[in-house]
Image (cartoon, rainbow, N blue to C red):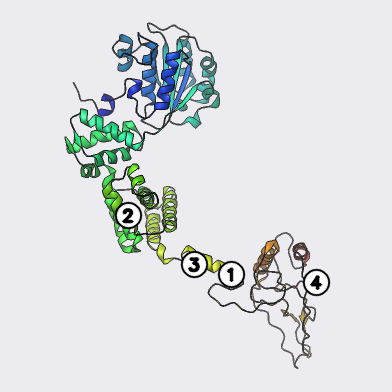
Amino acid sequence: MSYQVIARKWRPQTFADIVGQEHVVTTLRNALTSGRIHHAFLFTGIRGIGKTTAARVLAKALNCVQGPTPDPCNVCEACREITEGRSLDVKEIDGASNRGIDSIRELREGVAFASSRDRYKVYIIDEVHMLTNEAFNALLKTLEEPPSHVVFIFATTELHKVPATIASRCQVFEFRRASLPMLADHLGHIAQAEGVTIEADALRLIAREADGSVRDACSLLDQVISFAGAQVAAADVSNVLRTGNRGLFERLLGAILASDPAAALKAFVETQDRGLPPRQVLGDLARFLSECMRVVLLGRQAAIETGLTEIEIGQMSELMGGRSPEYLAVLLNLLVDAADRAADSRAPDLLAQAAIVQASRMEALSSVEGMIARLEALAQGQPAGRPTGPSGGNPVSGGGYRSSPPSDGGMSASSGGGAVRPVVPASVAPAPREAPSGSAAEAAARLHALASPATPVVAATPATPPAPVPEPRAAPARSESEVGRLLIAHPAVDRLTGTFPCEVVSIKPE
């Protein structure tokens, strides 16, 4: 007899064998015991967690000679035919290849006939979300009121693609990811039955790589046994599975944390030599960094529960070197964002190189505390890195423009008939910033940005010294509404664009 893979050989045949779905198993068993059997079920969840397997077990429980029973015997003719996939009364349909309305018409025609031998005629439609809208609509009436001898069982990995009209006619069961300890324990039982000795750390590595999928875990265990034989160590798992790249990602992250762009770029080039796509490199590096963050924030015991081994936890703790969670979060966000952009980039390798170099220079950038200090200095009217200048007057804008009128109406002429040019009066000349407050300060900040002259204003040179200019009157304090009204009403403001076409803006008090 040909070899049968572990995933098929150890496929659950009873409800008790299904791993990690106690909430589903308990509900179905109670329904079978009490006779409250629904005519349609919808199983949803990720791949490889037992949706189709549970559908087959439910079909056996309904048609077993001892049934309906929560514990099918698996020895009667009905149970054996369903297990081997040759039962005439249990139809397994692939929704991806039978997705049209013609396939549903054939199904409706078959529903009208009684079962050939068994108690129920069971239709199992896998990947039901692949059916077309027309096929779903054709199924609605039959699904809502099927004959008493018909039971529908649907399975899907994408519940959101199933129309609400279909889901509302079914009992929906959400299958969960198998927890890592439960999955490792299940693999340990299988390995023991297969006569394989495997280390506990190796089991955790396989379970972590399976990401909650029982079928994936069995397939990975099969692959590892083929590589290592009857004695499996954690190093064997690292060599044969993707975890073998973990050391490379550790070196890459270590170079980034050490602010060594040359070493980081060299490690990235090595990933390209191994044939790893740039987006996968950035994604796996971000995932490795997130595991390190869990070690830093959650502690050793919580990290062990996520599948990390003691050796890995020690290496990660040493790698982090007491860095702050804020720094690690910013670095993680940078890598995740770069991975997303690399998916749509025409040159993902170049984008990944830039991201790696930028990440390795993170510590050279200003810290969050430094940026906060500079923002506080600006809020107090002091330019970042410069001493605070004298302040006075009543500011209209964040840039220091005053609302006082010019003493000469905003114009200055030479006594010798020189050219007349607009002059920036003292009341509107730029001055050190003062602490703004409220919406008026925000409007004033926009005014300052818009009113900044593109070219310097030069007054005409008088033939004789000008008469002394009297001290301008201090403008009365204006409320927030008055400031906004003056800005809008000023003739220099373009009311459509909000810009200042002139060089100087002067706001006169009313």
- Gap in angstroms between the C-alphas marked 3 and 4: 41 Å
For marks 1 and 4, the one nearer the N-term is 1
Which residue has dot 2 on it?
Answer: 317
**Image location of residue 245, percent across then percent down:** 28, 48
Give the amino acid type for the residue marked by disc 2 in the picture. Ser
For marks 3 and 1, the one nearer the N-term is 3
Give left or right: position of 288 versus 193: right
Camera-side mark, 3 or 4: 3
Which residue has dot 4 on it?
Answer: 509
- Gap in angstroms between the C-alphas marked 3 and 1: 13 Å
Up/down of 218 relative to 418, above or below: above
Give the amino acid type for the residue marked by disc 1 in the picture. Leu
Of 92 and 13, nearer the camera is 13
CB within 8 Å, label 1 to label 2: no
Give left or right: position of 246 versus 354: left
CB within 8 Å, label 2 to label 3: no
Seen at 55% across and 24% down, the residue is: 165
For marks 2 and 3, the one nearer the N-term is 2
Give the amino acid type for the residue marked by disc 3 in the picture. Gly
Give the amino acid type for the residue marked by disc 4 in the picture. Pro
Residue at the farthest left position: 230
**Image location of residue 446, percent across then percent down:** 66, 65
- Gap in angstroms between the C-alphas marked 1 and 4: 28 Å
Count of marks placed on residues: 4
- Gap in angstroms between the C-alphas marked 1 and 2: 39 Å
- Gap in angstroms between the C-alphas marked 2 and 3: 27 Å
Q: Secondary structure at mark 4?
A: loop
Which residue has dot 1 on it?
Answer: 378
Using a 10 Å C-alpha cutoff, classify the residue at mark 2 as few (fewer than 14 neighbours), some (14 to 19) or many (20 or more). some
Up/down of 509 relative to 8, above or below: below
Using a 10 Å C-alpha cutoff, classify the residue at mark 3 as few (fewer than 14 neighbours), some (14 to 19) or many (20 or more). few
For marks 4 and 2, the one nearer the N-term is 2
